[in-house]
Amino acid sequence: LWIHFAKAACDTHWKKACDFFGFMMWFWWAYCRILCFPVVIYYMLLSDPFDIPNMTGSYEGKLYFFKGTLCSFLAIMNVWWFYLISGMVFNAIFKGKQEDT
């Protein structure tokens, strides 16, 4: 939602609004992807499988752990994307450049 507000305010004379919306996009993306998503993966791989009966050794159990592994790789990629997005947001706010690097 915040990214659409930032795009709408980008070509207007409301530079501070565009910066605010870009910062809010960065903040909520970081919160959801860097904090909440790894917690979900932790419960998926380390907590919940032990509560589900007959999960270990079954086909569904192996598929469950495979999906958890793919989500772990996605969490690692989120850290890299967070680094890239942080660079773009801070360049836009502090240097005034609004272009991809």
Image (cartoon, rainbow, N blue to C red):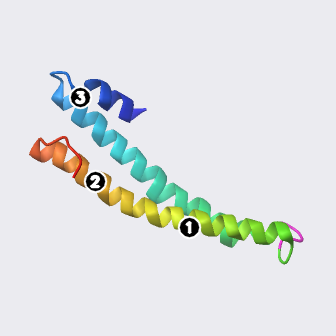
| Picture mark count | 3
Q: Residue at x 85, y 70 (%)?
A: 59
On screen, 49 above or below 57?
A: above
Cα–Cα span, label 2 and label 3: 18 Å
Residue position marked by numbered label 1 in the rendering: 72
Residue type marked 3:
Cys
Q: Residue 17: percent from the left, percent from the top?
A: 23, 29
- Label 3 neighbourhood size at 10 Å, few (<14), some (14-19), many (20+)? some
Residue type marked 2:
Ser
Residue 5: name its quadrant: top left
Residue type marked 1:
Ser
Q: Residue 31: percent from the left, percent from the top?
A: 43, 51
Q: Residue 16: percent from the left, percent from the top?
A: 18, 31
Residue position marked by numbered label 3 in the rendering: 10
| Most common secondary structure along the magenta stretch | loop
Where disc 1 sits, the SS reads helix
Can residue 51 be seen in the rendering of this structure? Answer: no
Q: CB atoms at circles 1 and 2 under 8 Å apart?
A: no
Label located before the other in sequence (2 or 3): 3
Q: Residue at x 62, y 70 (%)?
A: 69
Cα–Cα span, label 3 and label 1: 34 Å
On screen, 27 above or below 51?
A: above
Numbered circle sitting on residue 86? 2
Residue 57: name its quadrant: bottom right
Residue 64: name its quadrant: bottom right
Q: Nearer the viewer, mark 2 or mark 3?
A: 3
- Residue interval drawn in magenta: 51-55
